[in-house]
Amino acid sequence: MEKIPLFDRTISLLSRVMDLRARNHKVIISNIANADTPDYKEFRMHVDEALKRHSGPGSARRLRRTSRAHFPVGRQDAAGARVTREPTSPNSLRGDGNTVDPDRSMSRMAENSLLYNTAAQILNKKLQGIKAAIQGGSGGK
């Protein structure tokens, strides 16, 4: 007999999206907070890349760190997304070596917040559907 999961991969993926977006928000906030720090190099979290690895074919077979004593696999944060430093742009007008562009960072934060809120709304609708099914579709009345 084939096993049919109650909670499909959508809920798992949405949870992963929200976790990565929350971590990305912290990275962006850190960049904005250091916008005036000399020689500070902007960090960038590659969320889309991590999501493709999570949802792509063979994602269940990737290496996992099962103990803190194990070496991490690649340069990734705890959520599995790659975090890199942004190189200095040759078009930068800043002379202090800082690579943070506050306007670009605010734009990234707005986009990240929008994507987080979208995932939260989709997850909410999914859970409402499960709740309605449990209650027999009558809304518990």
Image (cartoon, helix red, strand yellow):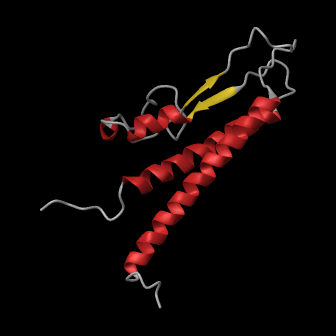
Residue closest to the eye, 76 or 122:
122
The quarter holding residue 88 reads top right
Residue 10 sits above or below residue 80 on the image: below
Question: Viewed as shown, does residue 93 lie left or right of 30?
Answer: right
Q: Percent x, y for residue 21?
A: 60, 44
Residue 40 % position (x, y): 78, 22
Q: Is residue 69 visible?
A: no
Residue at 43% over, 29% down: 73
Question: Who's the residue at 40% across and 81% down the image?
Answer: 137
Residue at x-position 38% and y-position 38%? 64
**Whether residue 128 is visible:** yes
Q: Tally the marks.
A: 0
Residue furthest front as drawn: 138
Residue sitting farthest toward the top? 90
Left or right position of 64 against 110 = left
Q: Nearer the viewer, residue 130 or 83?
A: 130
Give me the residue at 52% from left, 41% from top: 79
Q: Residue furthest bottom?
A: 141
Q: Is residue 75 above or below residue 62?
A: above
Question: Quick check: 92 above or below 105?
Answer: above
Give residue 101's position: percent from left, percent from top.
Answer: 79, 26
For the N terminus, the image quarter is bottom left
